[in-house]
Image (cartoon, helix red, strand yellow):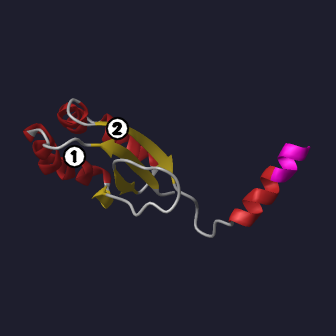
Amino acid sequence: MTAYALAHLHPQPPLHDDVFTYIERIQDTMDPFGGRFLVHSTVPEVVEGPFEGVYVLIEFPDMDRARDWYESDAYQEILPLRTDNIEGTAVLLNGVPDGYDAAATARARRAAQNA
């Protein structure tokens, strides 16, 4: 099942040069794990609630490869270039399987909650 690395970042201009080095090097850390950017430093069009910052979304073939990428020596080597200079939160998420049905999920959760 597809997995994602999602970061909600709060960069403050001007960006430290280390951040540019991080951006230049991150793709090489993702390639061995099948990672690809879906969203990169995109400022969202906010339609509900307050929001500050930017998003980064990286797709991986599965959670094992997402986790292996994040924990890899290559990524851990460059990670401080970002975390020392930009505040934010990063998470790894499983996607939903093909044919996912939100209504069926709601029914099952409702039934479990009311049991």
Whether residue 60 sits left or right of residue 96 in the image: it is left
Callout 1 touching callout 2 (CB < 8 Å): no
In the image, 31 versus 50, the foreground residue is 50
Q: What label sits on residue 29 in the rendered view?
A: 1
Image point (10%, 43%), residue name: 21
Q: Is residue 13 left or right of residue 4?
A: left
Residue extending farthest right: 115
Within 10 Å of disc 1 (Cα), the crowding (few <14, some 14-19, many 20+) is some
Amino acid type of the residue tagged 2 in the rendering: Gly
Mark 2: secondary structure: strand
Q: Position of residue 89 (x, y in %)?
A: 39, 38
Relative to residue 102, is residue 37 drawn left or right? left
Q: Nearer the viewer, mark 1 or mark 2?
A: 2
Which region shows up in magenta?
A: 110-115
User: Vertical placement of 56 versus 80: above or below?
Assistant: below
Q: Where does label 2 land, which residue?
A: 88
Q: Amino acid at mark 1?
A: Thr
